Image (tube, rainbow, N blue to C red):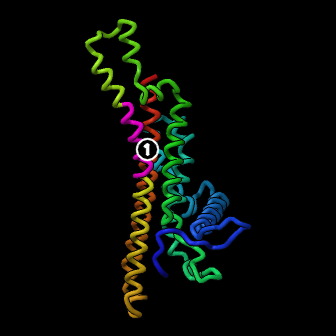
Amino acid sequence: MHIELAPVEAFKIGDYSVPNSMTATVATTLILIVFALLVRRKAGVIPSRLQVLFEEMFMMFYEKLEEGLGEKRAKKIIPLIMTFFLFILVANQFILIPFASSIVTAEGGEFFRTPTTDYSLTLALGLIVMVAAHGIALFVSPLGHIGNYFRIAGFIDIIKGKRPVGELLQVFIELFLGFLEIIGDLIKVISLGSRLFGNIFAGEVVIIVISGLMFATQFIVPIPFIALAAFAGLIQAFVFALLSTLFISNNIIHASHQH
C-alpha cells in the first residue's frame, strides 16, 4: 500500500476513467443493500440480534429528530439521516474488509480505495446535507426560510411607518447578518466534508506508515492503530449524521418561527 492524496484510475468505460474510490463506493452500496435485505428478512416480533442493532441505531437519531420537529416530520427525515450514517459507517471501515486492499488494477494500482478518503465524495455528502436542509425548510415555509437570509422586513416596516427611521442602522445590521448566514452555510459544507475526510485519511496514513517501517511492523504493531482507526470511523459516522440532523432541524425550526 502507498499514500495517494487523489484517487487513481481503477478502469475505463470508453473515455471515462472510473477512480478506485468510485469502485469502493459501489461496493459499499452493495454491502448496505445486502444488509438491508438481511434485516428485512429476519425482522419479526421476536427481534434477531441484527434487528436489535439496527433498531438501536434508528432510535438514536429518531428521538433527536422527534424532540425538535415532532413525530410527523421526524418520520419523513429519518430515512435520509440513517442513510448518511450507515453509508459513512461502512465506507469508513472499508479498509477492514478482508483482501479488499490486495486487489490491484492491471497497472498495479489499488482497485479499491476507502470512499471517504476521497475529498470530492465527502464534500458531495456535505453539499447533499445543505441542499436537503434548505429544500425541506423551503417546503415547510418558503417565505419564512428566505427571510432568514434576506432580511428586508425591517426596510418594509420603516417604509410602512411601523418602525422609526432612527432604527435604519439596526435594519442594515440585520441585513448584513443575513448575508453572514449564507456564508456560514457554505462553510458548513466545507466543514462537514473536511472533518470526515481529514480524520479517515489521516487514520489510513498512520496505518500505512507504521506498516511500512519494516517487515516486523507489518503484522502485530499496526493492530492498535487499526482498532483506533475503526473506532474513529464509527465516531465520524455518528458525528456527521448528528450534525446533519441538527442542521436540517434548525433550518426547519427557524423557517417555522419566521412563518
Spot occupied by residue 258 in the image (x, y as percentages of width and height): 43, 24
Q: Out of 103 and 149, give the one closest to the viewer.
A: 149
Q: Residue at x 50, y 46 (%)?
A: 129
The vertical placement of 91 against 190, above or below, is: below
Question: Where 215 falls versus 42 (above or below)?
Answer: below
* Main secondary structure type of the part rendered in magenta: helix
Residue at the image position 47 percent from the left and 80 percent from the top: 2
Q: Quadrant of residue 156?
A: top left
The residue identified by callout 1 is: 186
Q: Quadrant of residue 100?
A: bottom right
Residue extending farthest front: 15
- Decide if residue 42 is in sight here: no
Residue type, mark 1 in image: Leu
Whether residue 191 can be seen here: yes
Instruction: Let me know if residue 180 is in the magenta part.
Output: yes
Above or below 83: residue 142? above
Examine the structure image and report whether residue 205 is included in the region drawn in magenta.
Answer: no
Give the structural element (helix, strand or loop) at label 1. Answer: helix
Q: Magenta residues, as a range?
A: 178-191
